[in-house]
Amino acid sequence: MDKKPFHIVSPLLESLSLSRAGGTRVYMKLENVQPAGSFKIRGIGHLCQEVWDEANRRALELAEAEGWVSIHPFDHPLVWQGHASLVQELKDSLDTKPDAIVLAVGGGGLLAGVVAGLRQVGWQDVPIIAAETWGAHSFHAALAAGRLVTLPDITSVAKCLGAKTVAARALECAQECQVISQVVEDTEAVRAVEQFLDDERMLVQPACGAALALLYTGRLQRLQHERRLQPPLGSVVVVVCGGASIQVAQLRALKNQLGLE
């Protein structure tokens, strides 16, 4: 019997402000409105539901012993498969495939899931633009080195990107598909958060701001000029990954910390 997923089919909306900034039609995949406030419920929910009987039995054992069980937040095939559902929703909503997908990379679970989803719907040729902030750039560092790299510390304010070592699968994805790594400054990510709040009336965390900054700072156009993206772009999807861990007071504090006030 099919079980109802824990995540919802999130809205896909065209953004006029991001379209102006990016120079192309930009669609927002609003994962920030998921029940848990993030795309992560797709993967974690899928992992729990495929193995529900085993998980339930083990949970009862642990409850009796007053212990805990840990599910890895990004480095598990079932987590990736759960995230892949996002791409199927894009396929169901869009008339034609996008010319690029913009997303943020922390541990690499969302990237791995999107790559899996692109394969499943036959969109393997859609390039992915992977955004990080300096100080949380474990994926970028791994690409440059050609192997997994462990950052000495997470110094970025985008703590949701705070994986010192990206999942090995993320590095494999970059070898299988066109993945363009881009790193932005913390100030760019936080400015993008504030601009997005003004433009779309939604408050997101700096991890999401890293992806939005690629549009607001003209990186999309620069990648086309450099021929790393094939112009012209007909449409782009940006994954608005979440906003569960930020409030207006925290945004003010981040701006003050970075000297943006």
Image (cartoon, helix red, strand yellow):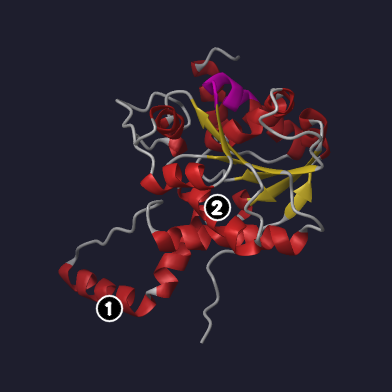
Q: From the viewer's perspective, tell me whether residue 89 is left or right of residue 253.
A: right
Q: Is residue 170 above or below residue 33?
A: above
User: In percent of the image, x 63 and y 23: which residue is there?
Assistant: 191
Q: From the viewer's perspective, tell me whether residue 140 is left or right of residue 167.
A: right
Q: Position of residue 134 (x, y in %)?
A: 47, 23
Q: Residue furthest bottom?
A: 1
Q: Position of residue 237 (x, y in %)?
A: 70, 45
Q: From the viewer's perspective, tell me whether residue 68 is left or right of residue 242.
A: left
Q: Is residue 9 visible?
A: no
Give me the C-alpha separation between circle 2 and circle 1: 32 Å
Nearest to viewer (mark 2 / mark 1): 2
* Relative depth, front residue between 185 and 195: 185
Q: Is residue 174 above or below residue 95?
A: above
The residue type indicated by label 2 comes to Val
Name the residue carrying label 1. 57
Quarter of the image for residue 57 reads bottom left
